Amino acid sequence: MTPDTTSKIEELVQQVQAIADPGAREVSLELVKAVMSLHQAAIERMLKIVEEKAPGITGAIGADDLLSRVLVLHGLHPDGFETRLSRAIDRLQRHFDSRGAAIEVLEAGPDALRIRFTGKRSGAGATARVTIENAIYEAVPEVGELIIEGIPTEHEAGFVPLASLMAGEPA
């Protein structure tokens, strides 16, 4: 999934949630959930067949960026929360190190993830926040709350992470 695809999906989800007719909105959301459920069952079965035929291959599948995102979205990733979070933090640290900034994990768990961002360039906060949020939510969308210290919060009104919709959480 490219960033353009992810953005398009989030845009469409927001459009569905903005449908004035509650019945039409509910049917649209139920359709998305049903399709996602079908995909989850099919991917889960596919992973079992692949693992039976080629033991150990699911690790390689989980390491692929695109496949990893899909597996995480469906709750099928072979790696646990801590491993996926560690990989995301490592990528973020490399990204920010090259820009004279840093991130530090202050608290890490599925209920809450607290990160401190330190950067020297003014105006980099909004971009850094988006970069951190995207990396974290792609790797561990099940995280309950993401707190980023050192960057002011500026969420779009009505923003709903795609993962929360797929998990069936209320908007």
Image (tube, rainbow, N blue to C red):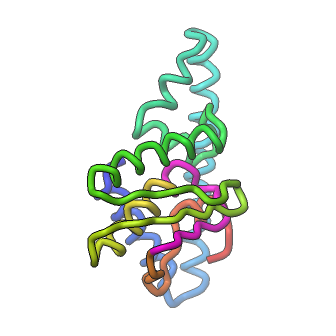
Q: Quadrant of the C terminus?
A: bottom right
Q: What residue is drawn where x is 55% and y is 62%? A: 115
- Residue 87 at what x, y percent from top left? 50, 40
What's drawn in magenta, residue-wise? 137-150
Q: Nearer the viewer, residue 94 or 28?
A: 94
Side of 128 where 115 appears, left or right: right
- Residue 12 at what x, y percent from top left? 40, 70
Q: Name above or below for residue 10 compared with residue 20.
A: above
Check residue 146 for magenta coloring. Answer: yes
Check residue 7 for magenta coloring. Answer: no
Side of 158 where 40 appears, left or right: right
Q: Nearer the viewer, residue 89 or 28?
A: 89
- The image quadrant of residue 32 is bottom right
Q: What residue is drawn where x is 42% and y is 32%? A: 64
- The image quadrant of residue 167 is bottom right
Side of 105 where 97 appears, left or right: left
Q: Name above or below for residue 155 compared with residue 133.
A: below
Q: Nearer the viewer, residue 157 or 29?
A: 157
Q: Name above or below for residue 98 compared with residue 49.
A: below
Q: Name above or below for residue 3 compared with residue 58.
A: below
